[in-house]
Image (tube, rainbow, N blue to C red):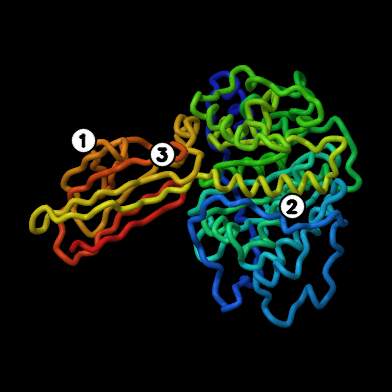
Amino acid sequence: MIAFALIVVGALAQETGETAAPPPPTEQAERTSTPAPTTDDGTAPAKSDPEEPPIDDGGAGDTATPPPADDAAAAPTEPETAASAVELHAAVRIEHALTLVEIDALLDDVAARAGAFGALETLGSSRHGHAIRMLTLTAPGSSSAEKPALLAVGYGRVGEDFGAEAALAFADLLVRNAAVEPYASLLADHVVFVAPALDPDVRAADAEATDETRFDLNFPLGWRPDSLRPGSGDFPLSEVESLAAARFLGRTPNLVLIVGVGGDVGRGAHLATAPWPGAVLPASDALVFETLAGAEARGVALHPWGRLGSSGGSFFDYAFQAFGIYPVAWGRPSEVTSLGAWSDEVARRTAELLFSLPRVRIESDELTELAPGLWQLDVAVRNAGSIPTLSALGDQRQVPGELMLRLDGAKLVATARRSDADEAYQLARLHGADDGVSLGGPWLGGGETRWLRLIVEGDPGTRLGLSAASARAGSSRLERVLE
């Protein structure tokens, strides 16, 4: 029955270009974590709202991947702080393409050093019984579901795809610097998922190239029958690996950006100028993709989804076409660039991409008493990131992500808005259901600010609260005492 349903979904996707979310997961992911790192005074690293300073890679030299830690380092007698972790652990240098055993060993090492900043989980098992593992990194103390998220992935064969190497170098960079800025604030405001081997069988030491179903051809939307495109599988999501990845996307509404490595892009392959015929790419989303790629126009190239040359049915295709999640890919290392230098650069610049993720902020301009019990509150609601709080395609697909404002502690009686700080306020009907306040649109563009004037009723001394929240842009809250 499940197979039949999936075949129907794939057929409908081909005929209509529309999609539904993947089936819900049947198992709860298992998580493990180790004690939380702290600063020297015993407290968690401080959170701030940083500008975008240059990111330091720790100054690692051209050394081989460090050997496993000895017994004393693996089981310290006292809790290790994040600050000491920065001092004691050199940067992981990846100088060769990694097998699955090496990927798992490095993932375990990074997770152990992350402490409460990290949690390992298993998304499922591969066809040949290998665990599909993922590391979640974020500052402890708040739910990872309440923060905008980035996913760093790999899923190709040894020496063909370097997503695993890039993802692990990125995770190591964040963990080594978890107690220092800007990383402390990045981990406080965001969640990072690291899945270096979504298709672990092809990274196993005994993996051989076969005509079996390929992970990156087995997703809905753009999928074609195996008879027309060998490697596509009997039907979309026919493989346990692709089904596990699809279920993760379906249960992660805060996922904004996926970062991988672009196949042969970077080794002389021709970049596509558009996605495959029938794919949907709204103009505003195309601009977001080009802005991301243009902002990273130095060193290793960053390629937007529409230029990766997919013929449909890939993991990236499904993420964007079904959910409006933005996928981008770094170009592969060139023949003359060492893998270590390439992975170091990609790790640094992937960390910089976290600054692009949407982050909603509420700021108060002025609170004025107009008459006894009647108050005027002027606020600015802004997106501190350069990516919209919801993609245009995500809005079309009706995925969760609308930016919602909620008022408490006072009664909303009138509203006004303006589109620029220098303009006059204009009356507007911004009342929402259940004390909600409308922004006049479901999302904020990258860097966009909207100014609202709220007329409220409340007794002097009452604490008024205004909260803003979006599945993909986090939340913010403003509190003012009516006085």
Which comes sooner in the sequence, label 2 or label 1?
Answer: 2
Kind of residue at badge 2: Leu
Q: 138 or 21, which lies in front?
A: 138
Snapshot quadrant of residue 16: top right
Quadrant of the rendering where the C terminus is positioned: bottom left
**Badge 3: few (under 14), some or many (20 or more) residues near its Cα, within 10 Å?**
some
Kind of residue at badge 3: Glu
Label 3 near label 2: C-beta < 8 Å?
Answer: no
Q: Which residue is mark 3?
A: 448
Mark identifier at residue 426: 1
Q: Which residue is mark 2?
A: 168
Cα distance in 3D space between marks 1 and 3: 18 Å
- Disc 2 or disc 1, which is closer to the eye? 1
**Badge 2: few (under 14), some or many (20 or more) residues near its Cα, within 10 Å?**
many
Which comes sooner in the sequence, label 2 or label 3?
Answer: 2
Count the labels in the image: 3
Snapshot quadrant of residue 422: top left
Q: 22 or 161, which lies in front?
A: 161
Snapshot quadrant of residue 235: top right
Q: On the rendered structure, is 177 left or right of 288?
A: right
Residue at image x 63%, y 46%?
151
Residue at image x 81%, y 59%?
105
Give coordinates of residue 228: x percent, y percent. 75, 18
Give coordinates of residue 397: x percent, y percent. 48, 31
Residue at image x 55%, y 22%?
17
- Disc 2 or disc 3, which is closer to the eye? 3
